[in-house]
């Protein structure tokens, strides 16, 4: 905790000084704690290791609470209420983001979110934290401690807050509602973060590049761009990641787990984002993004962004070894492999052909194996790649999207108009062809 006044009822945690003695039993049982619990609550039969814990717990049943007249929050003692009132009086206010804290100590800890200062280091994995309490909770990962158990599904957690959040899975409670868009959140912190979507507030700034973020966690992950820190390592291939979620997704490469299945063609994917992208590219005809230079339509903003570089001539990817620049990352990767022998070739296990991109290898292997996962919805003809399907689809339509910029003749597909244009006007560049 950051506080110098302990409000056990709402945090489920006890003071930092007492953490090594016992964990709170205010929420549920502790399956890994063998200490005797001789103090029994006669109302709900919960047991506690110390009498003080039992006395605080009893307040829940007696209703002896202290209410804030400003926000109606309730506390277990007058001391806790007095500390809370400092928030409303703005006695301890952060000059960076305007947040009001209940004590000077809490304000000092909060300022570390802006400065990036993390004075508490884990002796096992060197991960650093802004608070000693966070370090203590993190250390449970290494010790394997998960003292908080759900009484409905027996899932265990290392932190009481995680258990409280988990319980809402069973209850469905979302108590915190946004007054601007009716979004409901399970936790007050989630609502506070959500409100920044409406206000545009980004109080967490990177001190190296001045990029700002709405959440401190996003700023912390961004800092790894500068530091190169990749603390999450795969235990099977030693590949490292800057985010634990990226490592979890990567593990499916080894397990071959593809839990996200398309209901239209039964193709499976390792991530939900890949499934969503597949549906949009293959099964949807919507093209809401148009190029302002030539009017060509695209299914995603990412595709449009890549296409625009053809018109602007932008080459944002530069080689670290020479002066070469490239429009796309794939071209840079291929250049590094061919010219500077940097990177890893992907080799076909059937014919030993090499590829600079794993995606191209997968497409190549499909031809060996005869797999044609892309099916035309009109004639059920199958194709090896989405590009081949896309090229085939205009045969079922009377729409002629491609026009010769020289004579105005229209074509269904791009290859014929390229050939025609060269014949029609060999001295003009193909940039004049309208799409």
Image (spheres, rainbow, N blue to C red):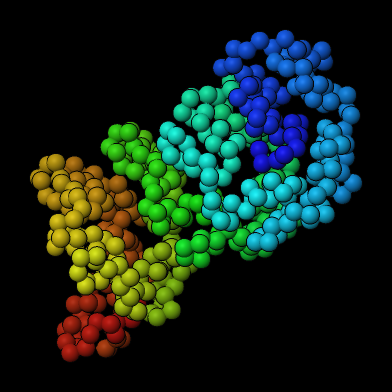
Q: Tell me residue 48's x, y (percent).
A: 72, 16
Q: Is residue 199 left or right of residue 413?
A: right
Residue furthest left in the image: 351
Q: Do we see residue 366 in this rendering? A: yes
Q: Is residue 419 left or right of residue 244?
A: left
The residue positioned 82% from the left and 26% from the top of the image is 60
Q: Do we see residue 262 in this rendering? A: no
* Between 223 and 393, the one nearer to me in the picture: 223
User: In the rendered view, would you say 238 is above or below 387?
Assistant: above
* Between 13 and 291, the one nearer to me in the picture: 13
Quadrant where the C terminus sits is bottom left
User: In the rendered view, would you say 117 is above or below 6?
Assistant: below
Which picture quadrant has residue 240?
top left
Quadrant where the N terminus sits is top right
The residue positioned 21% from the left and 88% from the top of the image is 428
User: In the rendered view, would you say 197 is above or below 243?
Assistant: below
Q: Tell me residue 169's x, y (percent).
A: 63, 33
How many numbered discs, if any? 0
The residue positioned 53% from the left and 24% from the top of the image is 145
User: In the rendered view, would you say 315 is above or below 285?
Assistant: below
Q: Tell me residue 346's x, y (percent).
A: 19, 48
Which picture quadrant has residue 20?
top right
* Between 412 and 278, the one nearer to me in the picture: 278
The residue positioned 79% from the left and 56% from the top of the image is 90
Q: Tell me residue 393's x, y (percent).
A: 33, 61
């Amino acid at each position: 905790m950051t506080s110098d006044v302990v409000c056990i009822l709402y945090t489920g945690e006890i003071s930092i000084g007492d953490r090594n003695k016992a964990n709170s039993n205010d929420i549920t049982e502790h399956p890994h704690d063998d200490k005797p619990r001789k103090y029994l609550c006669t109302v709900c039969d919960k047991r506690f290791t110390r009498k003080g814990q039992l006395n605080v717990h009893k307040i829940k049943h007696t209703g002896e609470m202290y209410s804030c007249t400003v926000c109606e929050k309730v506390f277990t003692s007058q001391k806790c209420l007095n500390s809370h009132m400092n928030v409303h009086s703005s006695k301890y206010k952060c000059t960076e983001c305007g947040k009001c804290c209940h004590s000077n100590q809490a304000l000092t800890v909060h300022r570390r979110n802006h400065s990036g200062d993390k004075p508490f280091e884990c002796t096992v994995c060197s991960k650093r934290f802004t608070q000693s309490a966070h370090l203590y909770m993190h250390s449970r990962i290494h010790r394997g401690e998960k003292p908080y158990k759900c009484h409905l599904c027996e899932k265990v957690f290392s932190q009481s807050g995680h258990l409280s959040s988990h319980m809402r899975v069973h209850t469905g409670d979302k108590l915190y509602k946004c007054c601007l868009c009716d979004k409901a959140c399970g936790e007050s912190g989630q609502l506070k973060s959500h409100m920044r979507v409406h206000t545009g507030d980004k109080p967490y700034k990177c001190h190296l590049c001045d990029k700002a973020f709405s959440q401190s966690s996003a700023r912390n992950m961004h800092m790894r761009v500068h530091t190169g820190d990749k603390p999450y390592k795969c235990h099977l291939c030693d590949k490292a990641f800057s985010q634990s979620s990226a490592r979890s997704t990567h593990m499916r490469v080894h397990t071959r787990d593809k839990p996200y299945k398309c209901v239209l063609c039964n193709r499976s994917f390792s991530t939900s984002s890949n499934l969503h992208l597949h549906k949009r590219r293959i099964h949807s005809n919507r093209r809401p993004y148009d190029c302002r230079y030539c009017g060509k339509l695209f299914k995603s903003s990412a595709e449009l962004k890549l296409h625009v570089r053809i018109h602007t001539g932008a080459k944002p990817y530069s080689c670290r070894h020479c002066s070469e620049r490239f429009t796309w990352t794939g071209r840079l990767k291929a250049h590094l492999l061919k010219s500077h022998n940097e990177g890893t070739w992907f080799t076909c296990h059937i014919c030993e052909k090499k590829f600079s991109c794993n995606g191209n290898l997968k497409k190549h292997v499909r031809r060996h194996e005869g797999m044609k996962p892309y099916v035309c919805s009109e004639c059920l003809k199958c194709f090896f790649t989405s590009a081949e399907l896309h090229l085939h689809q205009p045969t079922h339509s009377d729409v002629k999207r491609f026009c010769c910029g020289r004579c105005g003749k229209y074509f269904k597909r791009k290859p014929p108009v390229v050939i025609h244009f060269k014949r029609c006007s060999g001295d003009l560049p193909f940039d004049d062809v309208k799409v």
